[in-house]
Amino acid sequence: MTRTTKALLLLAAFVAAGYFIATRFNINPAHTIGEPLDELNGVAVYYNGAINNTSGRRTTEDGYNLGLKFQCVEFVKRYYYERFNHKMPNAMGHAKEFFSPAVADGELNKDRMLLQYRNGAGSRPLADDLIVFAPWALNRFGHVAIVSQVGDDFIEVIQQNPGPFGSTRERFPLERHEGQWRVGHDRVQGWLRREPPTSPSVST
């Protein structure tokens, strides 16, 4: 084995060990796991430490599964449950599974019982939408967040589990081209939204 090969193997082992530690242990002494960091409409965001950390499963009193504490999925499902009393028919799944490529733009995602909109299509994101990010090299499960604010040329999201030094709030550019709205982030697949409440019919 050459010196170069040994050096590369040693470097690979060092990187792998660093990734394992950074994604499974709390390396930020400023916060403790489970500490409230932020809130939106009365629904708290908790600190999770390393992105792969979990602290048991959270369920509601009636047994509805909200997810693993304090992962991103747990926050968005808890947000929709506490704010809208919304339960998803499919109560399981990683973040990447919240967006279904088989569902057409503006149609109902039956697993989540929410309307699904594709990034770069016609619909503009709205506050309270559930936004879905595709997986990437350092996070194979994807990511989900809640749209907390929509400006003329940006959106802001609130998120749980962005990493030990990540922010609970993040902004992305919002662009419109030929009537199509796009969030300027390569991994944003789209957003989910509650169906508008139907007005009761009035008999005459």
Image (cartoon, rainbow, N blue to C red):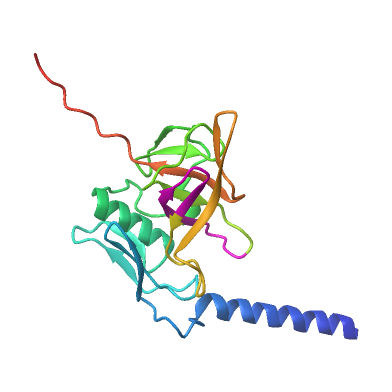
Find the residue positioned furthest to the front.
152
Residue at image position (25%, 55%) is: 82
Residue at image position (50%, 75%) is: 164
Magenta span contains residue 78: no
Q: Is residue 149 above or below residue 12?
A: above
- When asked about the image quadrant of residue 136, the answer is bottom right
Q: Position of residue 202 (x, y in %)?
A: 12, 20
Magenta span contains residue 152: yes
Q: Is residue 68 above or below residue 196?
A: below
Find the residue positioned furthest to the right.
2
- Give left or right: position of 21 versus 38: right
- Quarter placement of the C terminus: top left
Find the residue positioned furthest to the top.
204
Q: Is residue 158 above or below residue 163?
A: above
- When asked about the image quadrant of residue 5, the answer is bottom right
Q: Is residue 7 above or below residue 98?
A: below
State the residue in front, 184 or 53.
184
Q: Position of residue 134 (x, y in %)?
A: 56, 52
The span shown in magenta is: 138-156
Residue at image position (53%, 39%) is: 101
- Give left or right: position of 14 versus 166: right
Residue 1 seen from this side: no
- Quarter placement of the N terminus: bottom right
State the residue in front, 177 or 15.
177
Residue 56 seen from this side: yes
Q: How many marks?
A: 0
Q: Position of residue 30 (x, y in %)?
A: 44, 83
